[in-house]
Structures are given as C-alpha cells and as structure tokens.
Image: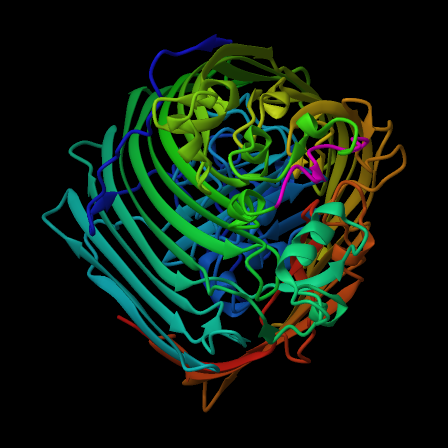
Amino acid sequence: MTHTSERARPRAIKLRNAAMILGASALALAMPYAAAAQEQIPGENVEQAEPQADNDNVIIVTAQRREQSLQEVPIAVTAVSGEELAARSAIDVSDIAQFTPSVTIQGASRSSGGGTNAAIFVRGIGQDEFLITFDPGVGIYIDGIYLGRTTGSILDLADLERIEVLRGPQGTLFGRNSVGGAIQIVSRKPELGVVEGFGSIGIREDDGFDISGALNVPLGDNIAFRVTGQHRQQDGFAINQTTGNDLSNVDRQVVRAQLLIEPTDRLSALFSADASFLNERGIQSSLVDLDTNSSFLQLFNGFSSPPGGPLAIDGTDVARDPDVSNLNRDGLNENTAFGFSATLEYELTDTLTVKSLSSYRDLASDFTADLDGTDAPFVDNFYSTRQNQFSQELQLLGTAFDDRLNFTVGAFYFREEAAETGQIDIFAGLFNLFQGLPGPIIPAFPGVDCTVTPQFCGGGANNPVNANFDLQFRTDSVVEVDSYALFGQFEYELTDRLTAIVGLRQSWDTKTLDYNVTRGGGSAAFCALPFGGAVGCIGNDIFAVPPTQFSDTFRAFTPRFGLNYDFSPDVFGYASVARGYKSGGFNGRATTLNDLTIFAPEDVWTYETGLRTTLAGGDIILNGAVYYSDYQDIQFAIAVPNPAGPGTLSPVINAGSAEIYGLELEGTARLTDTVRLSGGASFISAEYTEDVTFLGQPTGILNGNDVPKTPSTQLFGSIDYRQPVANNRFLIHARVDGSYRSSIQNEPSNFAPVSQDGYGIINARLGFGDADETYDLSIWAKNLFDERYLENGFRSGGGTNIGYFARGRQIGATLRFSF
C-alpha cells in the first residue's frame, strides 16, 4: 500500500446523450425454441437446420462455438428464443430466472437502491455488490461482448434472437472468466436480401405503455442493415407517503443498429452500435425490521426525538406494505450506456476459421436512495459512476484428424477505467449537535467512562473527538483494470461413442485503486485549528481515509476436463470437472483504515455429470444434471460494529467456504400438434462450512448457514396451446406459465426479517392472429394472483433493516405486426 501526495480524483468520462452503437456477433448458443407451427431459426455460424422428423423440439446451439444439437452439448445450458421470451411475457433479464434452473436475479443489489443494479446468482455463486471495485460472479455478454459492471445490467429484452444461460464455471471457451456461469444476450442479426421487420405496441396497468420495432434492409447483394428501437414507460406501483410521489416507475429506451457485410463466401463483418437510457425515480423500499437495541439508533433517537414525545424512529415505522414507502427522499435511478463492436470472421480453409471481436462500451450511472426506510434523515446515499471498457478477443476454430478433433483457442484482453463517487450520509448534522453539547459526555467507543477518561469522549465546542461523529462520508474511487487471458478447448473422439475434452485457461488481472474518504458534515472547520492534522486534515479537507493507492495482480489457471458418451442415438451423457475463479480486489466501501481491505480471488471446483435423452421419436426431451461445487475463499461484504468509534465497519474479507450440490431437470413434450408442455426443476443444498469473524467479532455468518440468493427448491412449467381456425387462415393461442421458489435468504447471516418465504407466480397469455403471423393481438397477465414478495433485502448494521418489494399483478395487451 502506498500513500499518494495528492488527493485522488475521479476521472471525468464524457458521455453523449444519444449514441448509435454497434453490437454484434453471437458467441454462443442458438435456441430457436419456437412454437409448433414455426420454422427453426438458425444460430450464429449455423446453417438452416434440416427438419428432423417434423419435430420442432430440436434445439440448435453454439455453446461450444460450433453447431450442435442441445442434446449433444456437455454443459448445463438453458436456451430460450426471442419468440419464446415474448410468449412468456418476459420484459427484462430478471424475468428469465422464473424458468431457468438454479438461477436468481434481483435488482437493488447490496443496498444500492439502484433498481437495475443486478445481483445474479447461479448455483449459489454470484455477487451482491455493485461497486466498481468488485467483479461480477456471473458474466453477462451482449452479442459476445462482456459487461464489466453489474450496475444497470437488468437489461430490457428488445429484438432478440435468443438468451443463453450457462451454469457452472466458464472460461475455456470465453473471453472473460466467470466463476458461477454466464448469460448471453444475442440480438437478431441483419439478413441479406430481405426487407422485413416488425412493430409492437402495448399497454399495461399503472398507465404502462410500450412501443418497439425493427427494420431489416438489404443494401445490395452482400450488405444488410438492421435497426431496432424500444421505449417503455409505466407509473410506479408504490407511493412515498412523505412526498406523495410514486416509486418504482419505468422510463427506458433502447436503440441498436447493425451492419452486416459479406463480400465473399468466406469473409463476414458485423458492425454494431447500441445505446440505452433510463431516467426513473427510486424504487419501493420498506423498513421491515427495527433493532431497538442498536446503540447508534438509540443515539439518533436521543438527539432527534422531541422531549417527552415519540421516538424519531420507533416500531410504528416497521411495515411490510408493498405499495407504500415512508421515505425522506424519493431517490432516483439514471443510467446511460452505449457500446460499439466489430466482429470479423474469415474461413482460412474448409476446416479452419479465425474470428475477431473488438468492442468499446461506456456507462454513466447516478442513483440515490433512503437506506433506513423511514422519513427520518438517518441513512441516505448517492452514487455516481462513470466507466468505460475496451476488449479485444481473437479466436481460432477448427477441426483436424478427419474431424475427430474439434478445437477452439483464443486470446483475450480487457481494459477498464472507472470512477465512482459515493455520498453516504449517516445521521446528517450529528457533528454540529456534538459541537453544541456542554462537554465531553458521549463515549467515542464502547467501554469508555467519560468521567474518568473524557479525552475519549465526544461533545463540547471544538472537541477533536467530535470529528469521529461526522458520519457524512464522501468516497472517491478510481479503478483501472488490465486483464489478459489465453484459453482453449480440445475435444477428441476416442471412439465413435466416447469423446475426451481438455480445456485450459490462464488469466492475469492487474488492478489499481486510488481511494479516499472525506467527512462532509462540518468537521472540516477543524482544519483551520491547531489540532487539524491530528484529526485527519489535509489542506481544507478532513479525511476518514487519506488518499491511498493499491495495486495488485491476480493470477489463476482454470482447467476443464470431461468425457462424453453416446449411449445410443437418443441418449447422451457427460461428466466434467472445472475450476472457476473470480478476481480479487479492494474494498470500495471502507470509511476507516481498518476496513480498507484487499481481498483475494474466489475459487471453485465443480464436478458435474449429466444425461440428455430424446424419447418418443423426438416428441419428448428430458435433460438432467447433478453437480457438486467446492467453493473457497468467498468474498464477503459485511457490516460489523466499529470497535474503535461510532457507526459500523464495512470490510470485505475472504473468510468462508461452502459446499454446494444439486440436481437440475428440464424437459419438453409435444402432446399433439397443438399442445406442448415444458418445465423444469432444481434442488440445491448450499451451506457455509465455517464461521466467519472480523477483528475477533462475530459477523453472524455461521457454519451451516444457507448461502444467500439460493432457494433449495425451484419448480417451473408451462402449457402452450396453438389452434389454427377458419381453414388455417387464423391462429388462436393460449399459454399458462407457473413457477415456484422455496424460501430464500438475502443475507449471509440468514437474518430472518429480510428473508423471503416460498412463493409461486402464475402468468397467462391469450392471443389471436393470422396463420402467417403477420399480426397478433394478445392479452396477458403477469403474476396473475398478485403474489407479493421481497425482491431483495439487506441488514444495515445500524438498526434499520430494509426490504424491496416486487411489483404485483400486471394485466396488459400487446398488438404486434410483422412484414
């Protein structure tokens, strides 16, 4: 650790209000999971598949960078086409968790109050922190391009070819290593020689209004252009009783433009630009529990409550009404993101292809939130993030030895620059209250007797100890990341039925953090006094954490080994072992030197075996996997009382391990030409295997605690009915989707008041259109029976514990036309 001579300042990263952007090549899996009457949709690098026994259950994916039936892929994959997403009334990325085994996606990660800040967990592994000093535990890719931040990553779904969810460690086929899994969002690409597109308009409750569309235009024989746009707005579902304004409203726009050039049969170039804009008020939040024994809460009530009157914060503030908040501010969520990418692909020979993916992305995010759930000015925050990233990936794909060997080798570089300013106001005005006390009468830390050692007590004009009670912090973080990787995977057919897989990856991640924390509640006045230096003054600012720089390099070798076996043409099995790694980093939430920690990488070994079966001539597909994960050096962001002063410490530590094992099932069945069933389940045991402490203090994370964000049971299913009528001129369709999740913990300590009991959700859709699907009118309901549940929750450490409720039932209608 080195100390800089100048205060580290966030870099200004200039953003434009609008941008045309380039997004592009699909690195993975294609799943045309189309309805019974539809043709199969080819994935990237996949020629139109021949119909197989008139069976639309066949799913083609490119999970291993080449065309394969899903039934031949030795990875736990869920693939959903854009048409299937629309049929399920899916709106944004979080909706896919309802029908994907072992996946949890929540907004408002780690007390951020940012509704699109994602906490994504796959098989119990993920990340609940949004700060720029943390890496995601599950990678999100847009057209093959990795998103470095979870901020703003609850993305809208607009004009998509498909979404792919890969479970378990990924890295030997990917540019960026992912410890828990990967979500790939693949947009629909331009088509040569075709003028086509669609338009869609929808309404929903709370004055909701959606409009979207796309246009594909050929520009000659070898060039095509596609543009997509979407706008979504909706009033909030909850009222802030303090201000009278609604919360959790929606106001979002997405635009994407793509240009495809294929000058020869061997060369293709895809250029893409995308931009997204979000401007919303804060999300609904409620005080769901109050710890009246909290010494800091007692201090706040002692100063803020009128003599003989009610406490400023008492049990009457506790409520679990999902449609009501009682906050001293509405909060805001603002995000602007844009990106450019270029994907070039050239077939060197009939058996060898080289591919290049280049991208630049830029993010600006601002959000504020009331973190105590009351109308009192107890805990509030504001975060402003400016981030840009550049990535370059090269791949060489091919076959050898009479096609018995399939291989992919690659190199990856990722550069990120990010600046983040946080304003955390804890008991605003406390310092000035201490200045007005008659003398040193309040202990600065537990165990002090102010009548014996008044020098360790706060209170009284110009008492230096009062600076410790200025808990209005401004954190300034500047992060630079350089990540390099070499990776490859080789699959060799030992016999006609047995294939061996060896995957290798070496990662190098170098990170630098410039960090400081200043106090902003008035104590900077001490810097003009003789003792200013003793209380942390540098110049005219008083520092809780002086300007500090960290730099470290994290390295990991993460292999994958596997065997595949074709038991018969309809039964495929696999077994694999893979190591996953998530880079270490620095604590961007520290307010003292004691919790300004460097944390090490996380590590997991996952052992998995799976079986894929095709029955009844392809009408029934049933796939399953069992796995065991040994999860080590887990990165914990915790909150514990400050043993050396008021307030809490928020360190990040590697102090835990977990054992995770589970079973996953997915299947589809075509009962008739008009009726199709699909469904799945996951059963998980995920527990910590040791107690976690910090500076000798218990954290509440105990051996045997459940891993958060991981329900032990998840069930989902659907029935889809499509009936041609009027001599096949028109089509009536109906669909019902149901999902169930058992109880879920939101805190590693398994703090019960912010946990969520098991719940189920039913969605339904009914529509009518012409048989050619040139138009369709649907009415639909999401969460038909108005189940109310916590989307997320957290324990603050200061006595107030917060929950964020999800929106209830939504009923709407959508008109779509295609040409």
Of residues 87 and 784, the one nearer the viewer is 784
Q: Residue at x 29, y 29 (%)?
A: 11
Boundaries of the magenta span: 438-449
The image shows a total of numbered marks equal to: 0
Relative vertical location of residue 185 with respect to residue 316 in this rendering, above or below? above
Among all residues in the image, which is located at the extreme bottom? 726
| Magenta span main SS | loop
Quadrant in the picture for residue 805:
bottom right
**Any magenta on residue 757?**
no
Among all residues in the image, which is located at the extreme right? 704
Question: Can residue 732 be seen by looking at this rendering?
Answer: no
Quadrant in the picture for residue 25:
top left
541 with respect to 265 (left or right): right
Of residues 126 and 344, the one nearer the viewer is 126
Of residues 665 and 538, the one nearer the viewer is 538
Relative vertical location of residue 488 with respect to residue 84 in this rendering, above or below? above
Relative vertical location of residue 93 with respect to residue 538 in this rendering, above or below? below
Of residues 613 and 421, the one nearer the viewer is 421
- Tell me where residue 321 appears, x and y as whole percent: 67, 74
- Tell me where residue 132 appears, x and y as whole percent: 46, 32
Q: Residue at x 59, y 49 (%)?
A: 111
- Tell me where residue 819 appears, x and y as whole percent: 26, 70
Q: Residue at x 37, y 46 (%)?
A: 365
Among all residues in the image, which is located at the extreme left? 220
Relative vertical location of residue 175 with respect to residue 774 in this rendering, above or below? above
- Tell me where residue 745 appears, x and y as whole percent: 77, 50
